[in-house]
Image: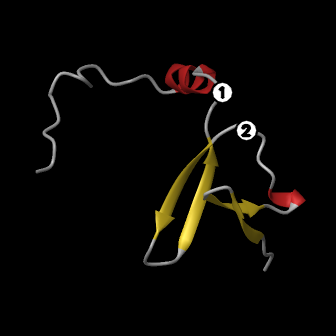
Amino acid sequence: MDSAKVFMSGKSQAIRLPFAYRIKADEVYIRRNPELGIIELSSKPFDWTGFFKDVEKEPVPVGFMDKPIQAAE
């Protein structure tokens, strides 16, 4: 298993990723699973191109936005 160095950068905690784990992005999404102790990073898209390509492959169903979704209380 690989490891990474954790350090402080100003008032933020940072992680120096090994070369093999570098991400080609200026910004990432981050999600934590506290039960498993996993922090997951994923690249934020630079634009909407990928989304529109996916919609061309699998169109959004008719009536998709007809019924509002109730917010959880």
Looking at the rendered structure, the secondary structure element under dot 1 is: loop
**2 and 1 marks in contact (CB < 8 Å):** yes
Q: Residues within 10 Å of mark 1 (few under 14, many from 20)?
A: few
Q: Is residue 40 above or below residue 58?
A: below
Name the side, left or right, on which 27 lies relative to 29. right
Quadrant housing residue 40: bottom right
Residue under label 1, please give it. 46
Q: Residue at x 53, y 19 (%)?
A: 56
Amino acid beneath label 2: Ala
The image quadrant of residue 24 is top right
Q: Residue at 43% of width from left, 22% of height from top?
A: 59
Asked whether, in this view, residue 13 is left or right of residue 5, the answer is left
Residue 61 lies, in percent from the top left, at 33, 24
Helix, strand or loop for disc 2 = loop
Q: How is the structure coloured here?
A: secondary structure
- Residue 45 in percent (x, y) is at 62, 32
Kind of residue indicated by mark 1: Phe
Specify whether 1 is left or right of 60: right
**Which badge, 2 or 1, is on the more N-terminal residue?**
2
Q: Residue under label 2, please give it.
A: 25
Q: Residue at x 78, y 80 (%)?
A: 1
